[in-house]
Structures are given as structure tokens and as C-alpha cells.
């Protein structure tokens, strides 16, 4: 496994390009949207998982820079983002297989996958100190609060300050403790080999190990009570909005199983939960004290915009799609059908959209 990781690290650009190409070509597999064909979806899922694992290996490329993150999110712990990505790759296979063998009872299996994703995301939300989930938890949210000092930059200056003798050390108690630990670690590594005839060779080996094994500095994880104490009502509302966003897909499929996919009730309830959660998070400045304002980082602002774009999927969900969207697509296709090439491309696009709409997992937005 280590040899494979080294190969992926050395050829990461090639691996990334081939993964994107392979995933794109899976949309052209024959019988892609057939209700009875599990094979194409299994191939798609396998390639997706393979690409996800490779991307995870590339993202964990060792560097000399210390890694700073909340406890529970370092490389030695369970990777929740990787689990979420693998579940998302598998859920379409689960849906197609369940539909093939159990018919309408497939919603029981879809509920199970959505429940697993919701539990993992809630655990990730808690373990990251109640930070906003980026891309449903698949992208780590490593940005700190803009009002807090950058611990990572301080940690990156450890070695430079040590070389200059710490002549201008303005760190607080935490920074001085980290510096002392760094010095102790260096002395512990070099002192046993000081009297050895191979001490130079040993130091080179230890230096190489230090390069490929980055230091992991754990940041204290913020608890829910600390968040509420620090941000007041805004902190509680932010958590409520994130929980609504995380659990919305599970709520949606629960109501689909109860009322059916053709009913407006699941569609309307899902839209209401989305609107409520987004309304709470987007308008936090209207509640509570101004001094307890929650400041979003740039990736978090981009995530809020992404979530708003996901609302377009309601146009693809039944019963709205059957009653309105499909009719508009088919009428547009008929108008451009006589036009060479454009008519052909429009027909294929409409065919892909109609086929994708038949799969819950393609339009779930989860």
C-alpha cells in the first residue's frame, strides 16, 4: 500500500486527470439509466470509489509544514470525508439494486443510506468544533475564525525562530510551550547518535523522516456549550441551521416513503426545511447581539452560494418535473429538432436529464 501511495503522490496530476476522464465517460455507458441494469452503475461506483481514494491519498501528501486541525480530524483518525464520499459513490448502486429486487421498497434502502450519511455528517460537525460543512463534509473546513490568531503560521515559524536563537520571541504561553517541545524533540533525536561513528548518516535519515512525517498539532475542539456561550443566540441558530441542512435529505425520503414520490407533500416539506435552514444561517446578523457576530470565511461564503444553487434541483424533482419541467424540455427539443447538430445535441441533453431524473441519488443534492 505504501508503494502505491508513493506512486500516486509522484503522478498525482496524471491520476487526477484520468479519474476525471473515467468518471465523465461513465455517463456514456450503454443502458446507463435502465431500471434493470445494475452493471453500469456498479462500474460507475467502482470508478468513483477508486478516484475518491486516490484523491484522498493526494490530499494527504506529506509536507514539511505542520498540520493544524481540531482533535479527531488528523490523519491518524477515521476520515469522515472519505466515508461520506464512498457512501455517495455507492448509493446509486444501492438504489438500482433495491429497485431491481424489491421495487417500491427501494425507499427503505435509500432511507438507510441517507441516515448513515446524516449520522456521519453530524459526527463530523461535532468533531470539527461546529464548523460549517463544506460540500456536505467532503471538503475539510480548516479555516479558522478571522478574529482568532493563526496558530498554523506560528507553528510554521518554530524552526526559523529556533535557528535565530529566539531573540525576538513574542509568543504567548502556548507558543513558548510548542517551541520547547520542538527543541526537546530535536535534542532527543540527535543526542543518542552524537557519539556514534555513523551520526552523520543517522542525522540524514532522521531529517528525511522529519520531512515525510509532518508534525500534527491538535487544536482544541470547541464544544456546543462553548459556542453558545461565546456567540449566544447566533451560535444556537447557526447549529440549528446546519442540522436542518444535514438532515433535510433524510426528512425528504421519509416523507416520500409515507406519501409517495408523486405527492407534493415531500417536495414542499423538503423545500421548507431548505428555506428555513438557509434563512437562519444567511440572516444570523438579524438576531442576537452585534458583538457576538459570526464571521464566515471565504470558503464558507462560497458554500452558502453553492447551497442556494442546489435549489435548482427542485425543478428536477417530482411532481414538479413531471408537471412542468419535462414539458418545457420536450417543447424546446421539438423547436430546435430541425436544426442540424443543435437538434441532435439537444435531444441527447434532454435524454440525459430525463434519465438522471429517474434516479433519486442524482437529484438528491445530498
Image (cartoon, grey):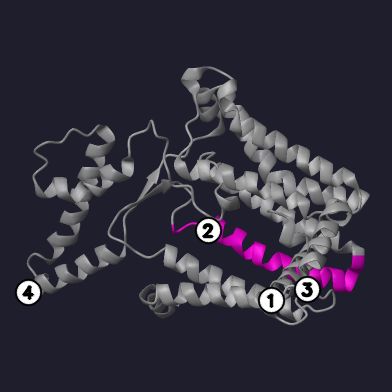
Asked if the stretch drawn in magenta spans residue 83, the answer is yes
Q: Residues within 10 Å of mark 3 (few under 14, many from 20)?
A: few
Image quadrant holding the N terminus, namely bottom left
Sequence-wise, the earlier of marks 4 and 1 is 4
CB under 8 Å between discs 3 and 2: no
Figure check: 220 above or below 313: above
**Residue 246 picture location, percent across and down:** 67, 45
User: Residue at position x 49%, y 22% from top?
Assistant: 292
Tag nearer the camera, 3 or 2: 3
Q: Is residue 257 left or right of residue 22?
A: right
Q: Which residue is mark 2?
A: 79
Q: Which residue is mark 1?
A: 341
**Few, some or many residues within 10 Å of mark 1 (<14, 14–19, 20+):** few
Q: Which residue is mark 3?
A: 338
Q: Comparing marks 2 and 1, which lies closer to the viewer?
A: 1
Q: Secondary structure at mark 3?
A: loop
Q: Quadrant of residue 282?
A: top right
What span is colored magenta in the figure?
A: 75-103
Amino acid at each position: 500500500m505504501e508503494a502505491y501511495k508513493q506512486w500516486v503522490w509522484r503522478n498525482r496530476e496524471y491520476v487526477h486527470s484520468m479519474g476525471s476522464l473515467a468518471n465523465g465517460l461513465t455517463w456514456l455507458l450503454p443502458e446507463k439509466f435502465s431500471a434493470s441494469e445494475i452493471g453500469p452503475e456498479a462500474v460507475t461506483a467502482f470508478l468513483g470509489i477508486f478516484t475518491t481514494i486516490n484523491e484522498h491519498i493526494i490530499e494527504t501528501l506529506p509536507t514539511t509544514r505542520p498540520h493544524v486541525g481540531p482533535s479527531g480530524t488528523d490523519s491518524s483518525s477515521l476520515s469522515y470525508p472519505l466515508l461520506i464520499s464512498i457512501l455517495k459513490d455507492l448509493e446509486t448502486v444501492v438504489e438500482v439494486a433495491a429497485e431491481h429486487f424489491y421495487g417500491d421498497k427501494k425507499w427503505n434502502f435509500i432511507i438507510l443510506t441517507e441516515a448513515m450519511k446524516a449520522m456521519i455528517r453530524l459526527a463530523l460537525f461535532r468533531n470539527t468544533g461546529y464548523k460549517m460543512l463544506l460540500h456536505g463534509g467532503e471538503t475539510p473546513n480548516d479555516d479558522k475564525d478571522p478574529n482568532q490568531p493563526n496558530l498554523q503560521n506560528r507553528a510554521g515559524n518554530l524552526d526559523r525562530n529556533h535557528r535565530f536563537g529566539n531573540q525576538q520571541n513574542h509568543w504567548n504561553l502556548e507558543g513558548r510551550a510548542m517551541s520547547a517541545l520542538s527543541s526537546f524533540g530535536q535534542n532527543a533525536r540527535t543526542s543518542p547518535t552524537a557519539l556514534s561513528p555513523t551520526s552523520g548518516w543517522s542525522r540524514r535519515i532522521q531529517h528525511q523522516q522529519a520531512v515525510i512525517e509532518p508534525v500534527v498539532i491538535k487544536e482544541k475542539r470547541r464544544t456546543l456549550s462553548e459556542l453558545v456561550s461565546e456567540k449566544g443566540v447566533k451560535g444556537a441558530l447557526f447549529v440549528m441551521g446546519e442540522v436542518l441542512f444535514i438532515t433535510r435529505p433524510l426528512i425528504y425520503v421519509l416523507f416520500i416513503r409515507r406519501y409517495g414520490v408523486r405527492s407534493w407533500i415531500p417536495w414542499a416539506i423538503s423545500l421548507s426545511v431548505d428555506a428555513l435552514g438557509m434563512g437562519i444561517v444567511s440572516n444570523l446578523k438579524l438576531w442576537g447581539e452585534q458583538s457576538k457576530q459570526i464571521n464566515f470565511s471565504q470558503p464558507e461564503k462560497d458554500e452558502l452560494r453553492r447551497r442556494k444553487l442546489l435549489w435548482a434541483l427542485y425543478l428536477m424533482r417530482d411532481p414538479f418535473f413531471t408537471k412542468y419541467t419535462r414539458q418545457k424540455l420536450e417543447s424546446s427539443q421539438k423547436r430546435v429538432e430541425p436544426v442540424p447538430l443543435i437538434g441532435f445535441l439537444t435531444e441527447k441533453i434532454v435524454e440525459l436529464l430525463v434519465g438522471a431524473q429517474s434516479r433519486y441519488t442524482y437529484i438528491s443534492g445530498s
